[in-house]
Amino acid sequence: MFAERLERARKAAGLSMKALGGEIGLSANAIKKYEHGEAMPSSSNLLKLAKALDVRTEYFFRPTKVQLEGVEYRKRASTPKKTLARINGDVLDQAERWYELLEFYPDSVKPIPEFSLPEALPEKVETLEQAEALAILMREEWDLGLNPIHDMIDTMEAKGIMIITTDVETDKKFDGLAGNIGPTPVVVISTSQSGDRQRFTLAHELGHLVVHGRLADDIDEEKACNLFAGAFLLPKQALIDHLGESRRYIEPRELFMLKHEYGISMLAILYRAGQCGIITESTQRGLFMSFSKKGWRTEEPGKPYEQETTYLLKQLVYRALGEEYIGESKAAELLGLSVSSFHKERKLEVLSAATAN
């Protein structure tokens, strides 16, 4: 157990055996022996390892072990393997804490629902355009109507999808990944992305859950999921209500306002306007060219759309603490905090200090 966890933590920190050894005053060979299970560190070296790898010492001996399966990355071709290893390590650490927490809840209490797809979904999707109808069907089944979805993370978590955010620095070469732990779908998004990009990733990965195994052989799943994501975030009828059924030109300010109302990028709205037949291909192409000249394909104007975050793990830790399923020390461990830091947070002392300043 210790050897495997040490290796994973080292890779998650992006360190070689030599670099880790150098940080704590040991040779690379000593680290190698630890990772191969040929030796165990002394208590003092264990503390140094935990500090260098930014984990609590309990991490190395945590009994819960999960397996993330069916992983699909939304990444760029240039994403380094070392970066993916760091992301994978971070995700597994968070997922393990999730499942350890859930094990403390009694069988009679179900703190999160079990994910299931609506029975109304068609068995076969024969055309790419049907992805639009699937998005509307999912909105109807989840009672979302055609209004903006203000919190994608909360919407998906409420249906039993585990959302994990990773702070691993990716130089914007990674958007997210999807997989599953047992029957639970897991979606991971990067905190280095803007809010509208996070939301599109979440909707895209939801699309994979919906269309997987249903697409005809000649349909590209990535294209289907992109169409699903756009339609889920900004339904066709809602877009027509805002822009009209047919336009000769769309003002950039209109796109900007729609972006901040529906949480979808200006560029993605342009794609949607073309998909919905509101503008012609030539009009869309001209607007794309204008975006390129202004540099808006790289960075859109105005303040970025606000990022989303998940509070569910923290909420369930405090719920478990309040119900005395766990103690303060275990709560701190599950949240990755020192006991003293957790105690201050629990007593709202951090908020009080911030207000005083």
Image: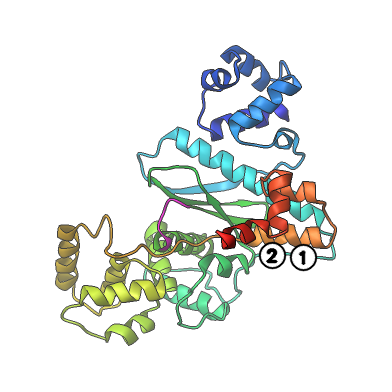
Local secondary structure at mark 1:
loop
Magenta range: 191-195
The answer to whether residue 307 is left or right of residue 33 is: left
Mark number, residue 110: 1
Viewer-nearest residue: 60 or 211: 60
Q: Disc 1 residue type? A: Lys
At 41% across and 35% down in the image, what residue appears?
80
How crowded pointer 1 is (Cα within 10 Å; few <14, some 14-19, many 20+) is rated as few
- Proximity of marks 1 and 2: CB atoms separated by less than 8 Å: yes
- Quadrant of the image occupied by residue 227: bottom left
How crowded pointer 2 is (Cα within 10 Å; few <14, some 14-19, many 20+) is rated as few
Residue 190 image offset from top left, x and y in percent: 47, 51
Q: Is residue 220 visible?
A: no
Q: Disc 2 residue type? A: Glu
Scheme of colours in the image: rainbow
Viewer-nearest residue: 275 or 294: 294
Tally the numbered discs: 2
Residue 82 image offset from top left, x and y in percent: 46, 33
Local secondary structure at mark 2:
loop
Residue 226 image offset from top left, x and y in percent: 39, 63
The answer to whether residue 304 is left or right of residue 183 is: left
